[in-house]
Amino acid sequence: YRWICGGVSMNYHTLSDFRTRHVELLDRLLSESVAGLMAEGLVTLDRVAQDGMKVRASAGAASFRRQPTLEEALAQAEEQLAQLKKELEADPAASKTRQQAARQRAAEERTERIHAALENVTKIAEGKKPKDRPKARASTTDADARVMKMADGGFRPAFNVQLATATDSQIITGVDVTNSGGDQGQLAPMVQQHEERYEQTPDEMLVDGGFVKKADIDAVSPPQGGTTVYAPVMESKDAQRDPHTPRDDDSPAVAQWRQRMATDEAKTIYRERAATAECVNALARNRGLQRFLVRGLRKAKGVVLLYALVHNLMRAVTLRAAAGGMVVCSG
């Protein structure tokens, strides 16, 4: 590799810069590599399982501030930056020192982060009820991070990693990273992502109850889409009412989903979700996807894409060996 690159040395920064600066390349590689496996007949989109996984963000809980505090912090940061610029104007030679340059760069970066936090706190407030809007907070470390409820029941700054996996091969076919604390509303975008990547949508999508949203079911199911959704139906508040019985305000697609999930066949198909999506998420945890060391949605997605590519490479070795009658051990 070093010879191909003309003797360029490899170090931490080379790898780190690659995974965060070339997100589009990694995204394209995922599409092309999965399409290649589909052409070999090793992967199909007949049945795809999707699941979300909360991954700690590179931001502390103490970095979250409300709008008045952020505005005060911004004023202080801008004042510090202006003071540094005055010092440079008074002594131009100081700009050449490494220490002075580092101080100015740090001040500029802090100002930019606080600006980003102020922009995000406004967006967060808009999504809250009027009485809760003054409580909206954003991080001065990573403005894209959100405080989310984690698997252990605690609340910490995190991102929501969405992985879609083909049940017949455990190949990751779709990747997204959001800062939404819940999975509701993530089904339709993932189905659309498959359309954009492979020019076809999954025949069937398996998701848990957290993804259920009537608008999403309508969007991906016939006649608007071509995907059949398998997801559990929520229990009715009325104990006398069968949750699988269509309601008066149900669209035809939602009514069909309710009735479908009452059948033994649908329940058997749905069991594949845990064996696929949750298995892949567990592998990700075991391989170190516990906390992001980068900041921002874009960079976080680059890290997840790199993980997905490596996961798929390992699975492809096993799939090709199985297709050829070989025995391969993979961790």
Image (cartoon, helix red, strand yellow):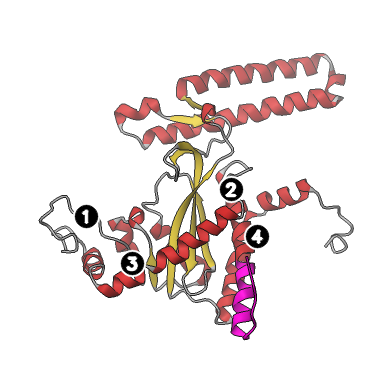
**Can residue 325 be seen at all in this image of the molecule?**
yes
The residue that disc 4 covers is: 25
Magenta-tinted stretch: 312-331
Mark nearer the N terminus (1 vs 2): 1
- Crowd class of label 2 (few under 14; some 14 to 19; many from 20; radius 10 Å): many
Amino acid type shown at disc 2? Ala
Q: Do the residues labelled 1 and 2 touch (CB within 8 Å)?
A: no
In the picture provided, is 17 more to the left or to the right than 220? right
The residue that disc 3 covers is: 229
Which secondary structure class fits the magenta region best? Answer: helix
The residue that disc 2 covers is: 300
Observer-side mark, 1 or 4, equals 1
Observer-side mark, 3 or 1, equals 1
Label 3 and label 1: CA atoms lie apart by 18 Å
- Crowd class of label 3 (few under 14; some 14 to 19; many from 20; radius 10 Å): many
292 over 142 or under it: above or below: below
Label 1 and label 4: CA atoms lie apart by 44 Å
The residue that disc 1 covers is: 235
Name the residue: 53% across, 17% down.
72
Residue extending farthest bottom:
325
Amino acid type shown at disc 1? Glu
Q: In which quarter of the image is residue 110?
A: top right
**Can residue 175 be seen at all in this image of the molecule?**
no
Where residue 16 sits in the image (x, y, percent)?
Answer: 71, 48
Label 3 and label 2: CA atoms lie apart by 28 Å
Where residue 279 sits in the image (x, y, percent)?
Answer: 49, 62
The local secondary structure at tag 1 comes to loop
Amino acid type shown at disc 4? Leu
Label 1 and label 2: CA atoms lie apart by 36 Å
